[in-house]
Amino acid sequence: MQKEGEEAEAEGMSIVPPATIPLGDDEPIECLIHFAQIHETFRKAEIDALAVLHGIEVVWTGYSDDSPYATLLLPSRTSARTLVSRSILTKAIYELWATSPTLPHLHTTIQQRTPHLWPRLTPHPFKFTIETYNSSHTSAAQLALINTFSYLPLTGPISLHNPTTTFTLLESYTPHSPTPHTLHFGLRLAPGARHLPDTYDLKKRTYIGTTSMDAALSLITANLSLCAASKLIYDPFAGTGSFLVSAAAFGAHTWGSDIDGRQIRGKPGGPGVKDNFVQYGLTDAYIDGFVSDLTNTPVVAGGRRFLDAVVCDPPYGVREGLKVLGSRDREKGREAVVRDGVLRHL
Ligand SMILES: C[S@@+](CC[C@H](N)C(=O)[O-])C[C@H]1O[C@@H](n2cnc3c(N)ncnc32)[C@H](O)[C@@H]1O
């Protein structure tokens, strides 16, 4: 049996797109994004970057780094699904039906604003879920809450694994408070891409080193850099290639260099950057790596722009030390390197 949504995310499986809710796609809608509570300062920036990448107009109506729930206006349901489809920091996006400080008022708002949508939803398989921030409910309390929505004329069967419509109540509590301060209600439209950091987890990667960048952070960076198919991405501090792998995961062609060729090659006889691309089936996306000191870089194009983005993690701090900031001898490293009669770049 196929699993979907958070169940699949938890197991690191690829996500099966949820069935399209039968509401058409021709109207602007208010949405709610349920964010993961990590890397908060990147969450809005990641969505803004994805909006640029996909050409989607986003109007934020509520965002705070302190809350996992943010609201925004979007042109259509399809654009909502597209917007979060590769977001690392989005758990799911919802079509927002109502927001309120109390449950009775939430019900009143739903009954005032949404009855015209009900006939198109009610014959289909459905389920209810509850998301709670800073609190939790027993199963019995959850069921009691769900039953307060009994005025929705739902005639379709309940389906926990393959619903057409997932109605969701999202509550925010102040810690230790018995009642929520804000409730949202909506329809789940699509999940984000929270499974990707698990797919590219460093613990399961063929070649890593002390400088390898955490998978979630490098995937977020690839999103911020608008990495995508037909883009050319360069990392001048490539090291073990973490950013190159993440850019390639989103379809970009990648190319990297490092002052220390051992980082790219790996230990003699052992794996190197190339082997990570083999592991992920991304060899077509890796152009190559080469040795280069960025302070004397050979990557010049006579003033022409040919890279779509430079994505990197420059050397800094005690671990890297001052010695890695490049050579003052402008001739050093410019001599051709020949090994076994062949010119070498790595
Ligand atoms: C913070 S690490 C980047 C790690 C990389 N993101 C990875 O996935 O392993 C910085 C890298 O910059 C390289 N580096 C230091 N100085 C450099 C220079 N002047 N030119 C090019 N690379 C340099 C180091 O060898 C190191 O691999």
Image (spheres, grey):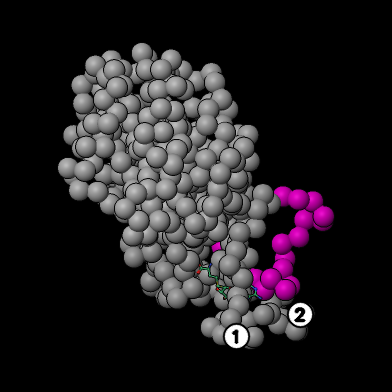
User: Which secondary structure dominates the residues rendered in magenta?
Assistant: loop
Tag 2, which secondary structure?
Answer: loop
Classify the position of the C terminus by image quarter.
bottom right
Q: How crowded is mark 2: few (under 14 residues within 10 Å), some or many (20 or more)?
A: few
Query: Is residue 145 in view?
Result: yes
Near-viewer residue (341 or 271): 271
Q: Mark 2 points at which residue?
A: 331
166 over 296 or under it: above or below: above
Locate residue 77, reporting x and y percent. Answer: 49, 27
Residue at 60% across, 34% down: 56
Tag 1, which secondary structure?
Answer: loop
Locate residue 89, reporting x and y percent. Answer: 46, 51
Residue at 79% across, 51% down: 304
Give the label, 1 or 2, closer to the camera.
Answer: 1
In the image, taking residue 52 as reference, residue 246 lies left or right, namely: left
Q: Is mark 2 within 8 Å of ligand 1?
A: no
Asked if the stretch drawn in magenta spans residue 298, the answer is yes
What's the magenta region? 289-306
Earlier in the chain: of badge 1 and badge 2, it is 1
**Quadrant in the rendering for residue 164:** top left
In the image, taking residue 271 as reference, residue 122 lies left or right, namely: left
Mark identifier at residue 321 = 1
Locate residue 238, reporting x and y percent. Answer: 56, 66
